[in-house]
Image (cartoon, grey):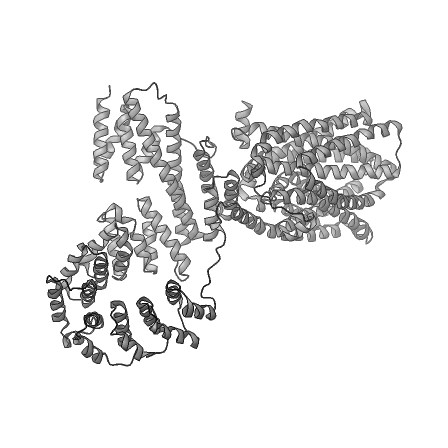
Amino acid sequence: MIKIFLQKSFGIRSGEVRISLLMQLYIFLIITTLLIVKPTINALFLSKLTSDALPNAYLLVALVAIGSSFFYNQALKRFSLLKIVTATLILSASIFLSLKFLLNYDYFSTELLYFYYVWVAIFALLTTSQFWVLANLVFNIREAKRLFGFIGAGAITGGIFGGYLTNLLAPSIGNDNLMVIASLILLGCIPLLHYIWRKKIKTLGYFRQKQRSYATNESSFKLILKSKHLTYIAGIVGVSVITAKLVDFQFSDLASKAITDSEDLASFFGFWFSTFNLASLMIQLFLTRKIVGVWGVASTLILLPVGILVAVGIFIVFPELWVVILMKSVDGSLKQSINKAASEMLVLPVPTDIKNKTKSFIDVVVDSIATGIAGCILIFVIKGLDFDPVQVSLLILILVLVWFYFIYKVRKTYFQSFRQNLINFSDKHHLSKKKKGNLVSTNATILKVLEEGEESEILYMLGKINEIKDKRLKLAVVSLLDHPSDTIKAAAIRNLYLVDKGTAVEKVEKLVHQKDDEVVLAAMQYLLTHTDINDLKIFDSYLNHDNQYIASAALFCLAKESRDNQKLAQRYSLDLRLEKGIEAVNLPSDHHRIHETVELIRAIGYSGIPKYYSFIKAHFNNRNEEVIKAAIEAAGYSAHIVFVDDLLGFLETKEFREDAEEALHHYGSGVIKMLLKRLKNDLISENVKRFIPNILSRFNSQESVNTLFMLLRNKDIIIRMEAARSLQEMKEKSKGLKFNKKDVVRLILSECKLYHNTLIAMELQKKITKNYKLELVNDSEMEEYSARNSLIEILEKRLDHGLQQIFTLLELEYNSKDVSIAYHGIKSEKQEVRANAIEFLDTLLQPNLRHTLLPLVENSILSASNQEIDSSLINVPSEYKCFQMLLKGQDVRIKLAVLYLLRHIEDKNYLKLVHRMVTDKDIRIRNFASLAVENLKKVD
């Protein structure tokens, strides 16, 4: 009963109840001890040395904290955290026990009073800091976000309990015996600590404990200075402590002026401090988890300074006691609840060994230094300059503004820390910023490769040169015309377009007579388009040439040049030449070169003469791959509708897919509407549909973007995935295209809904299949069991696709590298990495996406690891409603799997559900539904 209450009320999941209660008990005992010891020490200190000694005590605490941090860091290098925490507890218990004997003999020198005062201050900071370091090891970021509020309630409860216990027992057993109780309580923490360590931390193993560790011998101070994130955390702690001390001064000062009787004043303080603690406890138990979950860690930090700011503003207008009570209530109720939980989570992305060193330094040294600074302000500024309450409030106001600055900065570094963590955690470093290969970074590098490189290196470099301004590079490209490789010669000719018109024309003219089709064609095209040589002279010289390499290339060039120049086609009888070329190729001969056929097919494609297109079609079935590719290319040049179905068919074959996509791209933007229409009318085969988005993306236009957005609503998940991927690539390449942000968010939410439905359906099927006992089932039950497993497999695949689709869409809304890092983190096998990835997303996403997506991601991770999903985040409906939901969906494969399962369930209750599918548009669904209806009708 208690377990169920804790799970529902505080978000504690199965398996977390015991450790959460133990951690809560641990901090409860620590704070209870503190609240027994502190009043005794404070009373002794003030009665013997008076309040005038407090500023000096503040400064001494700061100095001791700074000095002791050195020894603490040295201890961390030599001993484990477990040994250090144990030693701290034993030493503190011994010191408190020694206080009993001093109280018995009433012997206190000034030095001893300062010693005990300073130690209690250090104890308060150090033990709580060690506890939260331990909590950071026990829980990952997502667990911490849910549980720190509940666990932190133990500290507040300990404060209340310790205070009441002291008031109750002190008069009857005396302060000296209270020290014995405090020591025993503290020693009771040791077995609790070792049990927690053994059950939760030791089981992680050495490497899991060190996952976020980076070996370092640097001091805590240097580590904080090197890290912006830690620097801002230290700033927040320091400013908040100083502000709290000034608020406390205002509260005490105005209360003492308004209430002169000491007993009434004590009663006043007792009432309000108890009220603050109770308010803090209620907030911690019932609001902290929800607020931190909704606002995020960094944003939650702003609540406390905002509350103080509002109270200070009111006080400046109405400088009265009730306003100061309001100010102190904000500080007292939020500091140890919401603000404490959020502050402790700030250090979660910090590597473990750095955290061990720096967190205690921040909690103890920075806090103590801030206390010392507050003491100096009280002595030299407020009392020295005789500040009135309103002036003190203005000073608080300035500090709050500085506080805001640090919070603003830490929000960014918190995000960046998780980002860097995910990169460091990555199993493979492909998520880190890729260093762009800069093979063309300097002209000297290019020149060296062109002059001395291997053939593949030279070709790579020639393909990368977009502009040649350096004279040496021009000469190097020209010199490649003499290279022994024909492939390099052809590539060099194509790069001559980047230099001055007519460059190396004599060399190129000679290359026309080379016995290589690629070189001859490249040379002739260059002479036609990038020299001052008359086109007619070239055609006159080469069309009737005896050399078939030259004649074939000239025919292709004529077809290309005359596409929009019918007079040129008529002058050189292009139609007749093509006809003769076809006749010659069709004649049986052993002397035909493959490239003659290739160039003739290409020429027909460019010619724009439809009567020869059958020749292109005929060669779609050629045995030679090069000829088929030429036919595909020619079909693209023609941009004729007669080839569209053939080109779409080639998309199924991997070897010709790239050529077919490029050919369809040659049709121009008019093909976009045609392809979309064919998709809508289901005129494209299932195996081809997935390649349509990539074809559309090649146009790189706003029209193609808008069309791809339409495909994001397609019923086929594969088409949606390919459309999203294409849009993401277009976004990266082209900055001028517009992507409707609202549409992207709506599409993400729609995909999340589909993901949710798929997840709950799969989870339900998993629960049902767990109840099967295979050795006892009959044949029909075996068939049902098999059908359920088939459905589960399909649903699992859909979940994988769905998650991938959601994150691809997120890349349209956010920085693609950030989203990619988060996605790969979530897919990691390491629990710690997944938790960091989810928290990274929590920081990255806007509220509506965060609240919808994160529960799905968390539950999908639980489901993938065969853990029970969190029912507080996702409600699983009945099986009937699940089937009804899946059959209403758009996924054909899921519908078929559901109908196949219903066919074997033998439950007439599903007959009505199946009847609706008998009239579906898809013939496969109709057939499966009919078979299911037939079987269900047979059920008795």
Locate residue 206, reporting x and y percent.
58, 37
Vertical relation: 777 (above or below) 827? above
Name the image quarter holding the C terminus. Answer: top left
Compare residues 831 and 334 and report the one nearer the observer.
831
Vertical relation: 887 (above or below) 768? below
Compare residues 2 and 461 and report the one nearer the observer.
461
Q: Is residue 418 left or right of residue 326?
A: left
Q: How many marks?
A: 0
Vertical relation: 383 (above or below) 518? above
Quadrant in which residue 562 is drawn: bottom left
Locate residue 329, reporting x and y percent.
68, 40
Q: What residue is shown at x 36% (from left), y 53% (from top)?
A: 726
Vertical relation: 313 (above or below) 284? below
Quadrant in which residue 360 is drawn: top right
Q: Is residue 516 left or right of residue 397?
A: left
Locate residue 275, reporting x and y percent.
68, 34
**Does residue 862 appear in this view?**
yes
Q: Is residue 507 left or right of residue 136?
A: left
**Does residue 250 appear in this view?**
no
Q: Is residue 270 left or right of residue 405?
A: right
Locate residue 676, reporting x and y percent.
26, 53
